[in-house]
Structures are given as C-alpha cells and as structure tokens.
Amino acid sequence: MFTSFEDLWVHLADNYIVVVSIILFGVGFTTLLFSRNLLKKVVGLNIMDTGVYLLLVSMGFIDGRHAPIIANGVTDTAHYINPIPSGLVLTGIVVSVSVTAIMLSLIVRLYEKYHSLNLDVIYELRNKEEHV
Amino acid sequence: MLRDLFASDFIHNFPLFAIILCLLCAVISFVLQGGGARRLTYILILIGMALNGSVLLHNLITGERFTYMMGHFPAPWGNEIAAGLLEPAFALLFGVVILCSITAGKNRISTDVRADKQHFYYILVDLAQVAMFALCYTNDIFTGYVFIEICTLASCGLLMIRNAGKPLVAATRYMIFNLIGSGMFLMGITMLYGVTGHLLFPQLQQAAASAWNSGAYHGIMILSIGLTVSGLAIKSGLFPFHFWMPDTYGTATPASSAILSGVISKGYIFLLIKIIYRVYGHSVFMETGIQNVLFLFGIAGMIVGSVSAIRAGTITKMTAFSSAAQIGYIFMGIGMGTREAMIAVFFHICAHAITKPVLFLSGGALIDASGGGRDFASLRGAAHRNPAAGLAFLCGSLSMIGFPIFTGFISKLYFALSAFAFPHKSMLVLLALAVSTILNVIYFMYVSVILYTGRPAPGKRVGVCRQKAFATAVFLLILVNVAIGLHSQPLTGLFELGLDLFLQL
C-alpha cells in the first residue's frame, strides 16, 4: 500500500482534512467518554460532532468551484460544489445544538441539586442519598 | 369492496400522515393541560395504529413493498419512505405498546410529574412515537440519524421529567452513552457516504456492493460498518454497554421505563437490521466478520445480564438487567445471520416489546403497594396487596422464562431450531440458551415466590376496581402475548414474507 514512510506522509498531507477530522473526532470522543467534568463532556461532544461535519463538508467541496448559490445567471452545475453535504451539515448542526441545549439543562439541574459538575462527586452524593 | 379499499394507492400516503400527525399533536399539546394532552395522545396513537394497520393490510393484499417520494426530487437526490410488511408491522406494535404503557402508568405519571408539566410528558411521548415511525419507514440513512437524535432527546426528556436526584443522574448517564453511540453512527454513515456518494438505501446498497467487490475500500467499509453497528448496539444496550440500563429503567416513572425498554431500544435494533440488509447488504456484512463479534457479545450479554439480574437488590434493577439479557438474545440471532435466526430475532423483538412493559408497569404497581420499597424484603407478599399487578408480573415472568403458551417460548424455540441450521456453532447457541433460561428461571421465580409468599408487610390492598386503566392495559398486553404464543404461525408467516420483501431493492 505505502512503499515508504515518505509515501505515507505524502498521502496524509494530501488528505489533511480527513486527518484533522479524525483527530478532532478522537479528541471529542475520548473527552465525552473519559472526562469526569460534565461541562468538558459537552465541549467534547461538540468537538466530536465538528470533526464529523468537517469530514462531511469536505466531501462536497470541489477545488475551484463556487458555493451552490446561483449568481450572475450561471446555472451550469459544473460551476458549483456539491450542495448535499453542506445541507447535511446544516441539519447536523441543528441536531447538535438541540442535544447541547438538553445536556446543558441537565447539567444546570444536576448542579442545583448536588452543587458539583464532577460526575464522581455526583455519583457519591447520589449513593449517600440512596442509603439515607 | 373492502379489499379494493385497502388495495388503493392512496394508502401510500399513510406512513407520512402518521409521522406528520404525531408532530402536529406534539405542537398542539403545548397549549393544552395535562389531561387534554393525554387524550390527544390517545387519539393520535389510535389513528397511528389505524394508518399503520391499513399500510400492513395494503401490502399484504398487493404482496409488494412501495416507496414514497418525499418532496419534488426523485431518487437518488430526494428523500423517500419505504414500506414492506415488517415496517408497518413494527410501527403498529410500537403504537400498541406505547398506548398500553401510558394507560397503565397514568396514575404514576400524575404523581411523578409536576401538574404544570404533565402536558410536556405527552409531548415527549408524541415525539418518541414520531421517531419510531420514522425509524421504521425511512429509506434515507441521514434521516435515520436525525430521528435517532430526536428519539434520544425524547427519551432523555421522559427520564428527566421526574424531578428528583436519581432520575437526573440516570438521564445524564443515558444521554452520555447515547451521544457516544450517535457520534459513532454519524461517523460510520459519513464514511459510507464518502465511499458511495448516496444516502438512499437502494442506491447505497448497489454502490456499497460495487465498492466492496472492487476490493479497494475494504478497510473503510469495515470501519464504517463497525462504527454504525457499534453506535446502534450502544444505544440499544448490548453487553458490555448495558451498564446505563439499571439506573435508567430503575429510576424513571414506570411508563417511561416501559416505553424505553419495550419500544425505543427495539426501534434502534430494527434500524440496525434495516441497515444490515438494505444498506450494506447481507452478503457484504457477513464477509466483514462483524457478525461474529455481535454473536459473541450477544451470548455474553445473555449470561452476564442474567447473572447481574440475580445479583440485583431491587425488582426494577433486576428487570432492567433482564432487558440486557434479552437484548443479548436478539444480537445473538443477528450474529447468526441465517433466515431462521432472523425470524427468531423478529419474534423475540415482538415478545420482549410486549412483555417487558408488563414487568415494569406491574413492578411499579407492586412497589406502590409496598409503600415505595423496591427491595425484595419490602415486596414480600406484595401480590396479595395488589393481586392484578402480582398476576401480571407472574405472567410476564413466565413469558420471559419461555414458558409454553407465551410468546417468549416461541422465540426461544425458534432460536433453538435456527441453531441447527448453523452447524459449526449450534452447540454454543444451545448451551447459551439453556444456561440463560435456567438463570431466568432462578431470578424470575425467586421474585414471584417472594411476591406470593411470606408474611405480607403492612399495606393497603389495591383492588382491580381501583386501577381499571392499569388492569385493562396490562392484561391487553398479556392477552396479545398469549394469543401469539398459542397461534404463532400467522406471525411467523408475516415475518417470512416480510423478510422476503425486505430484501427487495
């Protein structure tokens, strides 16, 4: 597949958007999974989603072409990039915002109840509550 | 005359009508009081059942599946709905289970949810229902993702609406696991879109098969399938991602637990089966080897879920861990991948969807009859204090164990029969079924014995007359359970025919 390290490096440099997307996805995913701070989890969720959206929108991009908005009467499709991934990303952003809003509202209610953003502390307090 | 009516092409509009109606009712419910919103939800579910039933009859009469173009753009650019036999059948089943769950859990909803927020509960039920219908009918993978997220939001709302510490913590945990699953699913479908350039199932399947056969995209395809399947497996609670279940199902109001365990998790599994068969294609999926991972995790889930249920200290946690074990059965069947195993999978989805709500709802009623005590010591003799709930719990337990005359028996029988068509792993399947069934007997019979024996703890006796809605809804589910258990052949025929139509492009 790759004959040398240099080959691999060139391949990665050519596909730098994919590399950045996967790094962002990985950073967000691990933060969402392992961070004990609830706010950092929400930040991780948004970084993870951003990684996916970057990958998705890059799939519709064609070098040298324009945003798919008809300007100066040009209707030839060869003039524009593929609009579908951009549309999907817009939909995805709406979903992300909704999910973030729900998560933040949950965090506010948890903070009001337990006065902490740390999941371990919250679990501990909940267990104490259970045994009372 | 009636045959002509149901053969009409106008029925092709019905799946969309059902989806739009749910959304409309959710909006209208904002301006209604709790009681009004509840009645509107009942009407909506009944209309949804009639619409889905009509689609099912239409497809049975015509013997074909249809696709319905959404908007003005034809395939491959526009969005589509598709319906064979399995899609309306499961949409109908989900409607029945949601209706029975909110009817039987009505009293607890009114005590667990603040009076001024009760209409929100029914809005969330409407949204959960719209998400289920869309997951059943969609023919577009990105629409599938959007409705997965709508379903996650509605489910989280159904959990956190009970304003107490434990449900809030459980909802947070549920959300985190679900968001991880959604993220993986989205990444998986993005990679697939990168390889194929399509979003509609038929075009995706053709492009995915070409990409796989070309040999150039094996790595990315395996990664895409792995992420998509793992995402949905996490969301449906497959071992080892089942640890959110006990808190989630154990602390929510019983109607929410019933909807989440009986309907929502099944919706994700149904979408997963659709994606395996109609997006990646069964042969490509089997060549990746991912089915072996699902098979092993399924078997592990059957055993670990049951052992955890035995060790659980409360009735709700026990029932929740039992769900993890039952999800294991379903994934074991998906991992086997044969036609016989898939029929068993559909049967088990059906059996679990109508049985588990009975257990959660009757468990909740028994806890109420025991002064709120969830542990087994408090529940001793609870079936004498609430005979209807005790009998319902016993029937649900017998179905889960796989006692003849109940649906649970039929699905386990089909799993065992399908094992023989799976020569090199048949012993493993049979052994897992035997061990899991013995473990099921241990914990369900232990609880049932506790409920009926010993010195009853003090508490008021609750007669059937004081809980008509609960008794009607729960015994309707048991009646359906027994009816299917005694006459399984029509449903088996429907699933066989449905699977054939499912495979059509």
Image: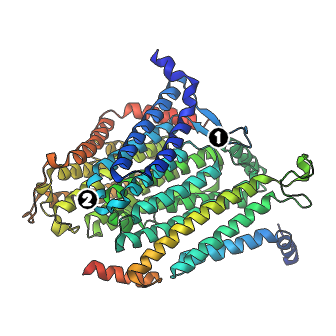
**Viewer-side residue, A47 vs B27:** B27
List the single residue furthest toward the top: B1
Is B98 placed above or below B170 here?
above
Is B407 placed above or below A81 here?
above
**Viewer-side residue, B453 vs B211:** B453
> Badge 1 is on which residue?
B80
Give the residue at x 26% y 63%: B315
Is A13 placed above or below B334 here?
below
Number of numbered discs overlaid on the protein picture: 2
Q: Are marks 1 and 2 in contact (CB under 8 Å)?
A: no
Classify 10 Å Cα crowding around label 1: few (below 14), some (14-19), many (20 and above). many
Q: Position of residue B70 (x, y in %)?
A: 65, 39
The chain that hosts pointer 2 is: B
Give the left or right position of residue A100, taking residue B240 as reference: right
Quarter-of-image position of residue B480: top left
Give the residue at x 72% y 61%: B219
The chain that hosts pointer 1 is: B
**Viewer-side residue, A50 vs B493:** A50
Q: Secondary structure at mark 2?
A: helix
Q: Position of residue B415 (x, y in %)?
A: 41, 46
**Viewer-side residue, B70 vs B244:** B70
> Badge 2 is on which residue?
B364
Which colouring convention does the figure follow?
A: rainbow
Give the residue at x 54% y 68%: A101
Q: Position of residue A45 (x, y in %)?
A: 60, 71
Q: Separation of disc 1 and disc 2 at Cα?
A: 41 Å
**Image quarter hosting the C terminus of chain B:** top right
- The amino acid type of the residue labelled 2 equals Gly
Give the residue at x 34% y 57%: B436
Quarter-of-image position of residue B221: bottom right
Is B309 placed above or below B75 here?
below
